């Protein structure tokens, strides 16, 4: 069988596939799909009755997105923020510290800052530690 | 296909003129039937799929944003519908035999049978393209509209598809004079 290449191939495919092209009878179609036609008509009537419907829908979506972003930001910043500052009164002091504070307080009530300074010096002597900073008494002397 | 005309028809449909949708549907009916046929291998089922696709397109027309892409959108709906029908009816997407489109064309000659076999062996994209092209002689413009391809891309794919058909035919003993 000798057939010319291009035209023959086109013709062969057309013969194999070709036929009467389908035609749409739109009246039959609207009858067959009357439910869908009614749904469409109801939908466009709703859109015409309230043209802002679609706009409102988008605005609702946009508002929801903004709220979500704001909530996300709040959660992220809360997770990464430093711990809240704690008042000194909320700290449970050790009994030694409480005694030291009490001793200094009593000394101040008895003799003012000089008595506090003496109390410090007594503590330094007992503990063997020395303050690098100048004492209140020495400070007053310098002044 | 005239995209401006499509847009005008869509706008008219959305204003409540259902006959405009009829005009739009008739413009693409052959093409979408061909798309469905390439997946269903049955003319009646292909027409059912095309009509169902049109009903889905109508119901969802309000949601269509790119009106100039209506044909491509309709083509995709048709593919989905055809695949659903194929699944429902347990039909193979890659059928064993491609029958002629026309019921009146009952020519079961050896050549026709072999051409159908050759088309059956094409991959789905090429098969869809060949059926679109040779069914009702869809133009490159029409094919491009429903497949979302440029004329150059269509030409390239169609040439390769025809080469594969020619090779198949040659292996079967036809077209011996081909290089």
Image: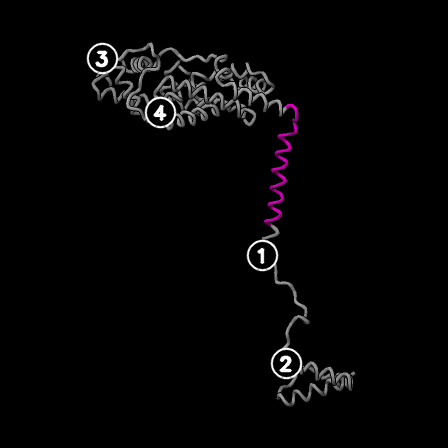
The residue that label 3 is drawn on is A2
* Label 2 crowd bin: few (<14), some (14–19), many (20+), radius 10 Å: few
Q: Residue at x 66, y 29 (%)?
A: A52
Q: Quadrant of residue B41?
A: top left
Q: Chain of mark 1?
A: A
The residue that label 4 is drawn on is B126
Q: Main secondary structure of the magenta part?
A: helix
Point out residue A86 in the picture as x, y percentages from the top left corner: 66, 67
The disc, 3 or 2, on the residue closer to the chain's N-terminal end is 3
Q: Quadrant of residue A101?
A: bottom right
Label pair 4/3, CB-CB below 8 angstroms: no
Q: Chain of mark 2?
A: A
- Badge number at residue A79: 1
Q: CA distance from mark 1 to mark 3?
A: 81 Å
Label pair 1/4, CB-CB below 8 angstroms: no
Residue A71, magenta (yes or no): yes
Q: Secondary structure at mark 4?
A: helix
The disc, 1 or 3, on the residue closer to the chain's N-terminal end is 3
Q: Nearer the viewer, residue B94 or B164?
A: B94
- Span shown in magenta: A48-72
Point out residue A79 in the picture as x, y percentages from the top left corner: 58, 57
The residue that label 2 is drawn on is A95
């Amino acid at each position: 069988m000798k057939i010319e290449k291009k035209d023959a191939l086109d013709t062969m495919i057309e013969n194999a596939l070709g036929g009467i092209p389908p035609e749409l009878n739109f009246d039959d179609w609207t009858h067959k799909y009357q439910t869908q036609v009614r749904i469409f008509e109801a939908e466009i009537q709703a859109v015409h009755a309230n043209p802002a419907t679609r706009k409102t829908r988008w605005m609702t979506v946009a508002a929801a997105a903004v709220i979500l972003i704001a909530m996300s930001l709040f959660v992220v910043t809360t997770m990464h923020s430093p711990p809240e500052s704690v008042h000194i009164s909320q700290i449970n002091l050790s009994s030694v510290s409480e005694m030291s504070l009490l001793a200094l307080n009593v000394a101040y009530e008895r003799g003012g800052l000089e008595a506090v300074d003496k109390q410090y010096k007594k503590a330094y002597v007992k503990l063997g530690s020395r303050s690098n900073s100048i004492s209140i008494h020495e400070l007053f002397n310098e002044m | 296909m005239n995209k401006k005309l499509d847009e005008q028809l869509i706008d008219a449909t959305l204003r409540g003129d259902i006959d405009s949708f009829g005009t739009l549907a008739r413009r693409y009916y052959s093409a979408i039937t061909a798309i469905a046929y390439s997946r269903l291998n049955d003319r009646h089922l292909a027409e059912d799929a095309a009509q169902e696709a049109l009903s889905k397109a109508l119901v969802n027309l309000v949601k269509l944003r790119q009106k100039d892409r209506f044909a491509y959108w309709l083509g995709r709906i048709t593919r989905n519908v055809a695949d659903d029908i194929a699944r429902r009816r347990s039909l193979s997407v890659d059928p064993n035999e491609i029958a002629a489109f026309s019921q009146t064309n009952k020519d079961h000659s050896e050549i026709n049978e072999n051409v159908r076999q050759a088309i059956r062996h094409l991959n789905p994209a090429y098969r869809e393209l060949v059926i679109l092209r040779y069914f009702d002689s869809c133009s490159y413009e029409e094919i491009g509209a429903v497949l979302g391809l440029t004329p150059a891309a269509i030409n390239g794919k169609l040439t390769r598809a025809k080469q594969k058909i020619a090779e198949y035919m040659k292996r079967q003993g036809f077209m011996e004079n081909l290089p």
